[in-house]
Image: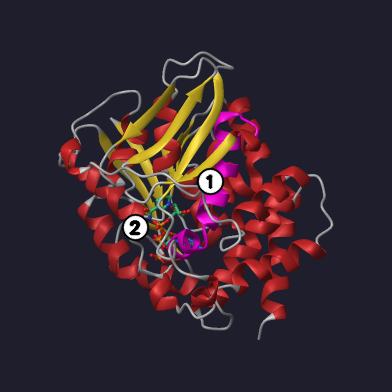
Amino acid sequence: MKRIVILGSTGSIGTQVLDIVARLSERFQIVGLAANNNIDLLEQQANVFDVSCVSIGSADQAVELSQRLANKTVLCGLEGMCELATLPEADMVVVAVAGAIGIAPTHAALNAGKDIALASKEVLVAAGEVTMALAKDKGCSILPIDSEHSAIFQCLQGAPDNSIDRILLTASGGPFRKSTLEELEHVTPTQALKHPTWTMGGLVTINSATLMNKALEIIEAKWLFDVAAEDVEVVVHPQSIIHSMVQFKDGSTIAQLGLPDMRLPIQYALVYPDRVDTGLPRMGLEAYQNLTFEAPDEVKFPALRIARQCIKSGGTYPAVMNAANEAAVSQFLNSKIPFLSITRTIESVLDRHQSVEPTYDNVIAVDAWAREAVYSSVH
Ligand SMILES: NC(=O)c1ccc[n+]([C@@H]2O[C@H](COP(=O)([O-])OP(=O)(O)OC[C@H]3O[C@@H](n4cnc5c(N)ncnc54)[C@H](OP(=O)(O)O)[C@@H]3O)[C@@H](O)[C@H]2O)c1
């Protein structure tokens, strides 16, 4: 029986984790759940999965939730998430909150010796070096949930160290793959929130539309698989059937294929190294006679170039890029800036940043600075 805490249990990933746990109830027990605002769903999840400890965004909501959930412990805020992440009875913490807010609870969990199933790629983008070093020091695993990184992880099973030539990170290309720059100027939040393949939370859906999601994933892959960012190549594959590939030094390329359903990579992270029936439909290859691949358009979608520059410059540039992006996306969703200004805003914040050593404290400090820089520049 693996005992699991889910941070972000009410989100797209969190609810799918719970679907899997419900189906494989003989393998898993939920010991903690955290959400931000969705008090009704969190209450329901705590009752259905008989969870004794939960955390919600604010102290006011915690008071209300305590009244609804008699005999359960109700925590709140970032502190609450960190406390959940260190529950003595937990074996694994699923980090599935939207954004860099996941850094502190991930570090709390690692410090307490917990394995991590990681959906929140922003943790490794902003704090990759310190997070991987901490996991190594504490002997903890960080298992990827992101479908591309799960694919790479699966392709690497049994591969000797230093055998990777390059990683081919696939991208759907997002909803605006075929749009012109002129059309991109007028994209509305409603249009950008419609992803062609995946149903996801707001931040990651907009990141998919700007290709920032892929930019973040290059950095995530660099840290997870200890490769140079230049060895991670992005390939646009609109059918989202090949979830990523690894090309080895002998020229052989191994790909992982599957129907686009996040329950597959999520389950792999939960049951690794086992392979267990997902109950999902099987892929019939004859239905996919046109698997296509193309290079990304970095003029229309500058996020990839920005991310590569940030990795090259190192220090706290990736953390600033990530935080500026989260704030700019929020400004776009509130109709304060146009779609193309998301990446322009990020570049302008990066131009003003003085990089420092990417320690835990410095990453948290520059994250706050970058958000403030975006919010104070747009009213
Ligand atoms: N969705 C996907 O298919 C997918 C695929 C690959 C990777 N990912 C990654 O997984 C992460 C989550 O994505 P998602 O699509 O599941 O996002 P989502 O649907 O927006 O869900 C986010 C979850 O985090 C919670 N949350 C947000 N801010 C919080 C805070 N300050 N404190 C506590 N909880 C907080 C939300 O609670 P409330 O519901 O109460 O607001 C919700 O449970 C992202 O990093 C994303 O890039 C997602």
Q: Is residue 140 visible?
A: yes
Tag 1: amino acid: Glu
- Please give the residue where the numbered disc 1 appears in the rendered image: 217
* Residue 63 lies in the magenta stretch: no
Q: What is the x, y in percent for residue 112?
A: 54, 35
Mark 1 or mark 2, which has the lower sequence index? Answer: 2
How packed mark 2 is, by other alpha carbons closer than 10 Å (few <14, some 14-19, many 20 or more), is some
Q: Is residue 349 toward the left or the right of residue 59 in the image? A: right
Near-viewer residue (167 or 101):
167
Q: Quadrant of ligand 1?
A: bottom left
Q: Nearer the viewer, mark 1 or mark 2?
A: 1
Near-viewer residue (277 or 285):
285
Residue displayed at 54% across by 71% down: 181
Q: CA distance from mark 1 to mark 2?
A: 18 Å
Q: Is residue 286 toward the left or the right of residue 206 in the image? A: left
Q: Which residues lie in the magenta part?
A: 203-228
Under tag 2, what secondary structure?
A: helix
What secondary structure do most residues of the magenta stretch adopt? Answer: helix
> How many numbered discs sit on the rendered protein?
2
**Displayed quadrant of residue 324:** bottom right
- Please give the residue where the numbered disc 2 appears in the rendered image: 12
Q: Is mark 2 within 8 Å of ligand 1?
A: yes
* Residue 217 lies in the magenta stretch: yes
